[in-house]
Image (cartoon, helix red, strand yellow):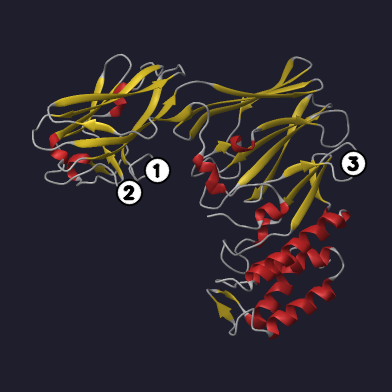
Amino acid sequence: MSRAHLPVVVAAALALVFLAAGSAATKIYSSGALRIPIRDGETIEQPINVREAGPVWHLSVSVRLDHPRDSDLALALVAPDGSTVALASHQGGAGGNFGSGSRNCTGTLTEFDDGGDVRVSASTPPFEGILRPEERLAHLYGKQARGRWALRITDDVPGKAGTLFCWQLDLSRNVLEIKRAGGGKTRAELSYRERNLDYRDVRLRILRRGRPIFDGPLPKAGCGGVCPYWRPALDFGRPIMVRDLDRDGEPEVIVDAFSGGAHCCFYSEIFRYVPASHSYSRTARYWGNAFYKLVDLDRDGSPELVSADDRFAYAFTSFAASFDPVQVSRFRRGRLIDVTRSFPARVRRSAKELWAQYKVIRKSQFPDVRGVLAAYMADKYLLGEQKEGWNQLDGAFRRGELGRSSTQDGYPAGRAYLRRLRIFLRQTGYTG
């Protein structure tokens, strides 16, 4: 699920999108769409070539094939050195197929993983979900990843034939990954190891004039080290940056990361050089789902951090129907300062886009406008146009667009919504 309003204020994807992409150490290698016959009394091997080197750290195998009697088949994974792991041997009784749906890689594939909830021998065709193979894939851990991997299928019972449509290999390598950035006299390195989207040994090293000033582990900030998962913001192409954020001639080092959770959270750690102590101070900023982008809005040579106010998520409606007003920050003397009111053109653009969204939503199949109007009112306060904004909301109230009772789906509605919105805008600093 994604919140449609986020592109209005910042080019960011929702947190869940971050789960789809791994680092360079983990990749999904696919056979692509196939139509390989599985004939009686024959064994086929369909290869996938892995070009990246390094010790195997994690493996899972996914398969989509049709066969009217799965118990005729033996499936195994063959490593580049010839080692094999049995995935499923004559399982499934009289049932048919591994996976279902489209007869290609877009169908529902059977996945074999040592962490599966059910053993394949305890499951039934079409073996959907994540299953533990007959032998542990961990037997192949530590072996060289580079080379020819193959799915071996043997049909040694006469009378039935089938077809292989796709197979995939999800493979992690135990390699140290390093992301580098530099600017002026400052260089920074973010290093880590990644295993199946689990990041560990995360370390930051900052060099100034070629000398290391900061060199230490980077803990999971803001969650006491118990985030559901942690990962650098690789999807934005820059988990680490070196930029002069405050025009003092000394670049800051910015590390962007994602802390995990269903809808949360992006955060940044900004490291600022302190000449007096010849060290770096650290400032953390939590963006929620909105993230940020660097834009020099006033063209003074130092960028602003343009994001959205994630406090509006869930405040008046569900997450999917929530909207955030624009938020602009500036880094000065080791602090991030809210300067949104200094950029009325950007706020006006946000308000205009939110109002356009409101007009679409109120005529849609799910006309919940409470989230978009809350963000719109925040922008109107920033512009000093709150009277006009409240007139618009009063009109929505009279038309019944805010709900006919005091609550709706567990959130304030009707006149109660208007009262709650006034309190919320005061508490979050928009009215003052």
Q: List the residue tagged with mark 1.
A: 106
- Rounded to the nearest angstrom, the CA distance separating label 1 from label 3 is 47 Å
User: Disc number at residue 44?
Assistant: none
Q: Position of residue 245 (x, y in %)?
A: 82, 36
Q: List the residue tagged with mark 3.
A: 299
Q: Determine whether label 2 and label 1 are within 8 Å by CB.
A: yes
Q: In the displayed structure, does residue 349 sit left or right of residue 14?
A: right
Bin the neighbour count of mark 2 within 10 Å (Cα to Cα): few under 14, some 14-19, many 20 and up.
few
Return the residue nearer the eye: 413 or 85.
Answer: 85
Return the residue nearer the eye: 44 or 424.
Answer: 44
Name which residue type carries label 3.
Arg
Q: Nearer the viewer, mark 1 or mark 3?
A: 1
User: Disc number at residue 101?
Assistant: 2
- Rounded to the nearest angstrom, the CA distance separating label 2 from label 1 is 8 Å
Q: Quadrant of residue 237?
A: top right
Name which residue type carries label 1.
Thr
* N-terminal-most mark, 2 or 3: 2
- Residue at 74% x, 82% y: name it: 395
Q: Position of residue 326 (x, y in %)?
A: 75, 56
Q: Quadrant of residue 412?
A: bottom right
Q: In the displayed structure, does residue 172 sit left or right of residue 205?
A: left
Q: Please indicate, yes or no, whether residue 430 appears anywhere in the rendered image.
A: no
Q: In what element is the residue under mark 3?
A: loop
Bin the neighbour count of mark 3 within 10 Å (Cα to Cα): few under 14, some 14-19, many 20 and up.
few
Q: Would you place residue 158 above or below residue 118 in this image?
A: above
